[in-house]
Amino acid sequence: MKKFVIITAFFLFFLLLVHNYYSKPGYFGLIHLDKKEDKQGQYMFTFHKVGDTEKVTLDLSDSKILIRNEEVIPIAESWKDIKEDNTYHISMEQNRFPYNKIFDTHTIEVFYMD
């Protein structure tokens, strides 16, 4: 019985890893954009997740933005449309653990502007 539980747990863990590897970009949630900076072509965003106080600063130069007409364009082309002190929906490049945090190893793929 103990062997069965261990094998089942390992199998479920393996399935979860495979699912996360092949899944589409994961929805992160609402962020509040505190500050944006253009440092010679590096588009730096400082933001925090709505409901959280931990601020994160990321270089989103390679990210894209999805605007109302569902056209995906690079951040550089939509820089003027992204406003500080606003709230945005974002998704991550991959659906990784932990789901409720963003670290420097994650890149934001798309801003969903409402």
Image: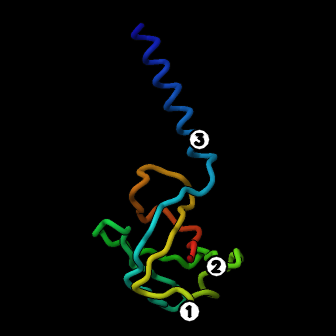
Q: What residue type is labelled 1?
A: Lys
Task: Name which of mark 2 and mark 1 comes first in the sequence.
Answer: 2
Q: Position of residue 30 (x, y in %)?
A: 45, 68
Query: Which residue does the numbered mark 2 point to in the structure image?
Result: 67
Q: In what element is the residue under mark 1? A: helix
- Quarter where residue 113 is shown: bottom right
User: As drawn, is 37 to the left or to the right of 75?
Assistant: left
- Give the residue drawn at x 52%, y 86%: 82
Q: In this view, does 79 lie above or below 13?
A: below
How far is disc 2 from disc 3 in space, using C-alphas? 28 Å
Which residue, as the protein is rendered here, is positioned at the far top? Answer: 1
Is label 3 in a helix, a strand or a loop? helix
Q: What residue type is labelled 3?
A: His
Q: What residue type is labelled 2?
A: Ile
Q: Position of residue 76 (x, y in %)?
A: 60, 86
Q: In which quarter of the image is the C terminus?
A: bottom right
Q: Separation of disc 2 and disc 1 at Cα?
A: 12 Å
